[in-house]
Amino acid sequence: MQAFDEVHRAVHYPPDRRFRVWINPWFVLAFAVVALTPVAVAWGQYLIAGLPQIAALSVADNPATPHGFPLWLRLSHFFNFFFVMLLVRSGLSILMDHPRLYFNDDCTPGTEWIRLTPLKVPRDRIWTAKDDARYLTPLVGTPGYRHTVGIARVWHFINVHGFIITGVFYVAMLFVSEHWQRLVPTSLDMVGQAWNVWVHYATFHLPPEPNGFYAYNALQQMAYFVVVFGFGPLAILTGIAMSPAVVNRFSWYARAFGGRQAARSFHFLTLLGFLGFIVVHVTLVAVTGFMRNMNHIVLGTDNLTPWGMILGLAAIGLVVLSWVVANYLSWSYPRRVQHALKLVTYPMQLITLNRLLPQQHYTTDDISPHFWPNGKMPTSSEWRRLADNGFRDFRLRIGGLVERPVELSLADIAKLGETKQITMHHCIQGWSGIAQWGGVPMKTLIDMVQPKPEARTVVFHSFGEGLYGGAYYDTQTMENALKPECLIASHMNGQPLSEVYGAPLRLRVENQLGYKMVKWIEWIEFVESEKTVGKGEGGKNEDDEYFDILPNI
Ligand SMILES: Nc1nc2c(c(=O)[nH]1)N[C@H]1C(S)=C(S)[C@@H](COP(=O)(O)O)O[C@H]1N2
Ligand SMILES: [Mo]
């Protein structure tokens, strides 16, 4: 990603940088009904009965309730804003790598409810998921540009740790102190009061405001409550529902959200929820006494000095600066950025998500009518010659650090017996698809070749090339290669693998993302460590696109 040479420029900064949003008209209609009904009802009430009364809250009414903004709260507020904004920006960069959202798990083109691309998928030629990735200006995305999902994920996952730590700390402090009482609605009466406040806003009236230092208005409190205890957890839970390790172990977990793609859609909707909240929140902070409000949340004082505002604006400047720094690091030191995440997540995944053994129970009815293809077809004359002869001359070489290297024809492999599995594929870009794969478990082949004790890593070499040229390959630890559902597949949905989907052989490794599943396998090599292969990051995409070596999520 470093230098924008010709090849990188073509990928990251394509000539077609149009930004278009298309939303299924039915969703626009449903959204309009949901959003406009409360507005219409509020107007009806206002025109018929006038503005409802809002009981003015005075400090003296509830002297016992906690008030003010202690330091822990002010700090949480700042860090939350900091992390959320980087999550939003990197999230948008990730989204643009597959700029379509669905409520079905097969992601058939045309079934999306929203599309952030002007393009319809052409039907007369192969259109890969990578072809479909769109440009996003770096003013909006981190790191922005086109097809920067690898680095965008690094920022997303680094910041999600900060977001969760801040959230846990904040909620714990809410309950340790008595400040939860300012947020959690404790009576149903609240709902009626919140409605009354809404009638004011919806008809362009400002309700009488309590001093936020002591109490919030009822709707404000409800909004804060929903953001903290609704959006926050929903964002985390739907994020986890996109993990191949989790979903391919507990498929009910994704189904609880309406499926893997519905979870992805809800993940995006929570992003919109956060953004919508920030816009309304900041507007109301500004119109209800900006200086006083800024003193509350920045300094924890209740007066009219300008210092809260000055410091607050400086803090916002710091947040904006963090976007600039993140962009700079992404383009200048992508390898270090990649390794920074690896330092934390690699050991952590080994003891958590990577322990889950895939066990999926899909039926033939679940098989997707469409399965997005990805990757560059091999251009080697060797592969072409083998393909033209139906791969009858193909021999799978398995060698490296093994006691008994072998060369197997497709017929030899077929004699080992066909294992079938119907599984969900998760591409790093965001799409999914369910297919049946038939082939031989890696475990069978490992038992056959007897790896030497020092062989810790299995390398799958492809006939194909990576996005920026050079042989495509990827690696698995011996541990993952031995897991259930790790298959060298020769068949897809009952047919021999077609050229596009990886003929003659491809890997299936269901607790990880799609790019680990090498297509067009040429040979398999056992080595001590991935460090000695390619650029040493564990795979072609890991080397060139800064993807994770172990993508359990
Ligand atoms: N040789 C090779 N294998 C590859 C790729 C590639 O570019 N080259 N792309 C990977 C990615 S990113 C995905 S999502 C899956 C896509 O498999 P599919 O084409 O069957 O959907 O293949 C993986 N295997
Ligand atoms: Mo992928």
Image (cartoon, helix red, strand yellow):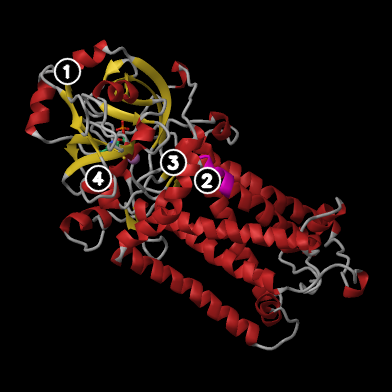
**Residue farthest to the bottom?**
305
CB atoms of marks 2 and 4 within 8 Å: no
Mark in the foreground, 1 or 4? 1
Q: Which residue is mark 1?
A: 409
Name which residue lies at 25% across and 10% down. Answer: 415
Secondary structure mainly formed by the magenta segment: helix
The answer to whether mark 2 is within 8 Å of ligand 2 is no
How far is the residue under mark 1 from the one under mark 4? 26 Å
Q: Which mark is residue 239?
A: 2
How far is the residue under mark 3 from the one under mark 1? 32 Å
Tell me which corner region of the image, top left, top right, bottom left or bottom right, holds residue 475.
top left
Task: Indicate the amino acid at tag 3.
Answer: Asn
Name which residue lies at 63% across and 71% down. Answer: 75
The answer to whether mark 4 is within 8 Å of ligand 1 is yes
Image quarter for ligand 1: top left
How far is the residue under mark 4 from the one under mark 3? 17 Å
**Residue farthest to the front?**
453
How far is the residue under mark 2 from the one under mark 4? 26 Å
Task: Indicate the amino acid at tag 2.
Answer: Gly
How far is the residue under mark 3 from the one under mark 2? 12 Å
Q: Which residue is mark 4?
A: 540
Task: Indicate the amino acid at tag 4.
Answer: Lys
- Sequence-wise first label, 1 or 2: 2
Residue 47 seen in the figure: no
Name which residue lies at 7% across and 32% down. Answer: 381
Provide the residue span drawn in magenta.
236-242
Name which residue lies at 63% across and 67% down. Answer: 76
CB atoms of marks 1 and 2 within 8 Å: no
